[in-house]
Image (cartoon, rainbow, N blue to C red):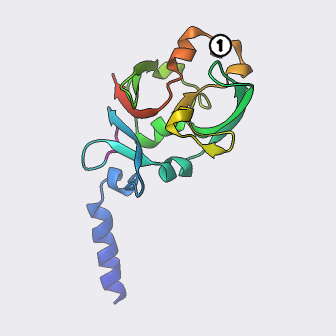
Amino acid sequence: MRLFFAILTAAFTICLTPAQAEDLGTPIGEVVLTVSGNIAQTGPDGTAQFDMGMLQALPQRSFETSTIWTEGETSFVGVPLSVLLEQIGAEGATIRATAINDYAVEIPVGSISAQDPIVAYEMDGAAMSRRQKGPLWIVYPYDSDTKYQTEVIYSRSIWQLDRLEIVK
């Protein structure tokens, strides 16, 4: 019997490719983010899809900052964009971020630090509705450094984010 399980385990391990062994998982809930383009980790349709639970399971970062779109200091929680890119094996020079209404911006991969920006999924301790710029919003800690207080950075702070495409 031990031999049977040893053979079965070996056969199962040999059949898995590295991508399958590190599978992102299948969204159980509503898909809130779809990533396409030059990525290593994909599902059957060639994209990486995330529901809110999958994003929340990734390492998170939180900070408080004022924004030009909200009143006073606001707290945000989300996954650092760099962590998300690493999770899917992204390789490219540019990210095309697109919102629900098809508004799109480009973010150079070289401008992303280990911590900033984040793909925020909580604002002031609660999930963000579409009316509140959610469910996902690319946010920088604007108050932490003047380099985050520029028109370029503000333009990259896309809300109602639902798609990322990694391009070369």
Q: Where is residue 38 in the image (x, y as percent from the top left)?
A: 32, 32
Above/below status of 79 relative to 71: below
Residue furthest to the bottom in view is 1
Magenta part of the chain = 38-42
Image position, residue 151 (x, y; %): 57, 9
Q: Position of residue 124 (x, y in %)?
A: 69, 39
Tell me which residue sits at (32%, 35%) in the image: 36
* Residue type pointed to by label 1: Gln
x and y percent of residue 22 in the render? 40, 53
Query: In screen coordinates, is 24 left or right of 75?
Result: left
Quadrant location of residue 60? Answer: top right
Q: Which residue is drawn at 71% across and 17% down?
A: 145
**Tag 1 residue:** 149
Instruction: Give the camera-side residue of 5 and 57.
Output: 57
Of 154 and 39, nearer the camera is 154
Q: Which residue is drawn at 33% across and 65% down?
A: 13
Residue 14 falls inside the magenta stretch? no
